Amino acid sequence: MADRRYTKSHEWIVVDGKTVTVGITDFAQSQLGDVVFLELPSPGRKLAEREAFGVVESVKAASDLYSPIAGKISAVNDRLSANPELVNSDPYGDGWILKVELAGELPSDLLDEAGYRKVTEAASH
Amino acid sequence: MPYLVHSPEDRAAMLAAIGVRSMDDLLVDIPTSLRIPKLDLSDGLSEFETMAHVTALAARNRLYPDRLTFRGGGVYRRFVPAAVAAVTSKPEFYTAYTPYQPEASQGTLQAIYEFQTLIAELTGLDVANASLYDGATAVAEAAMMARTHTDRTEVLVAGYLHPEYLEVLRAFGEGRGIKVRRGSDPGPKTAAVIFQQPDFLGLLVDAKALTEAAHGVGALAIACVDPISLAVLAPPGEYGADIAVGEGQQLGMHPSFGGPHVGFMACRRELVRRLPGRLVGSAHDAEGRRGFVLALAAREQHIRREKASSNICTNHSLCALAASVYMTYMGPDGMRQVAEVSFERAHVLAERLSALPGWELAFPERQFLSEFPIRVPNAPAVLRKLARKGILGGLNVQRWFRELKGVLTFTCTEVNDPMSIDELVQAVSA
């Protein structure tokens, strides 16, 4: 998907007007292994760029989730509380995590698909 | 295996290897007033002679018999059934350093699981951990859970919480940015309201109202409870508390100069990922047999590192086992009987003491279970007088609370027989 953008810390975003959907990448979910729990914030919370907003727990690790952008949370994917495995099975679809109303501009260091592929290839070696 | 002391050469080699000159250099952080430079023992005594000398010295200690001890304040003398030591002294439990590998330690893990189950039942909450060090650290750990859960900084201590628990709470809280305030008016910054039931003085508090006040501002309610009292009082889960903590010493442990004891902690299911320390769960192996394993380890500091809400990755397993044996052996009826006998005797004692000239209950309108505050003329003199008769009188709580001038808290348990109460009353009247 051409309009999906990525961060070096393995989150993705899709921008639709002022609404930004946030998730973790396919590479991230494959590195984490089976996701068993997500600790997520409540809608309405304001996030700063790079702020830790939650935790993803897998059978292997517990990792912080960072917001790629600044804004206010408008929705949290409720399905993940009962079905955290959606992050593994459909990271770019039903496994989305947050919707955020963007405040200000998108950060300039977001990567496109080719740029992100270089990050993951470097990480795999 | 014989015990081999280090030779002076061994010591010199070890000190050289770590780069210090003498043993004293290793002890610089300990104030010299607390160090014993040399034991006052003659050189060249045989083991037999040394034992005889030390035994004679020990015989000069004056011990208060359990039945003539009327002081509680957080640690209590109760009857400990022989079954407790019979189980805890089994080498499988006694000598093992809490091994957690499920393939090697089903007995240890099951014992912890049963402790958790008993504490959850006693407190009326969903889940309990494998234990903590003591009541004081359990209170502090609960405050840190609330701090992380609510993302708020203030912890409100309502009423008379054990003053040493408060000190530990402040010490733990400092590094976590927790502001501890005493009062009963939670606000929008309040992460938790902490109260003790019965309180440090032995008085019953309105736990339900305090819980509702906490919930009214979106804070958690933390109840610090006496486990024996739960045999007759409403459990924290019933009045809606989110976390229950307490000191478990009364459940089969002797005072032992103040420790080791055991802290317990239980909470609502929604908070389980904030619950500090070890947690054992029940599981099934590949062949479908029931077994026990450590559960939800991702909560813990060794995985979450600085993001974890607690640094505790251990527990007091042997003391928790003592508590489990005690609760199982006594059963609900036995524990209720212990609580009721203590209640009755404390009320007899309160009635007789408050009839003495100049003695009056400090809070006559408040209810209590087995410990109560009473204002006496010249408290230090009363305690000295009792000590001369071999009786350990009440605790002088003015030491912590200036407003409680001349107030002693007396406690009764099942070990204070009716004759001992007569002896106490006679001794103070004489």
Image (cartoon, coloured by chain):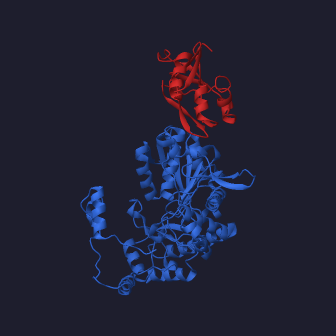
Chain colours: A red, B blue
Is B235 in front, or is B250? Answer: B250
Which residue extends farthest front?
Answer: A125
Image position of B385 with respect to B319: above or below: below
Q: Quadrant of residue B101?
A: bottom right
* Residue at x-position 68% and y-position 66%: B332
Q: Using residue A91 as the reference point, say whether residue B28 is left or right of it.
A: left
Image position of B421 with respect to B237: above or below: below
* Residue at x-position 54% and y-position 35%: A63
Is B261 in front, or is B122? Answer: B261
Is B381 in front, or is B337? Answer: B337
Which residue extends farthest right?
Answer: B288
Which residue extends farthest left?
Answer: B21
Q: Residue B141: horizontal and vertical position, in percent?
A: 50, 50
Q: Is residue B34 visible?
A: no
Q: Quadrant of residue B83?
A: bottom right
Q: How many marks?
A: 0
* Residue at x-position 58% and y-position 56%: B100
Q: Residue A70: horizontal and vertical position, in percent?
A: 50, 21
Q: Quadrant of the C terminus of chain B?
A: bottom left
Q: Residue A73: horizontal and vertical position, in percent?
A: 57, 24
Q: Is residue B101 visible?
A: yes
* Residue at x-position 40% and y-position 60%: B400
Q: Residue B218: horizontal and vertical position, in percent?
A: 57, 39
Is B364 in front, or is B231? Answer: B231
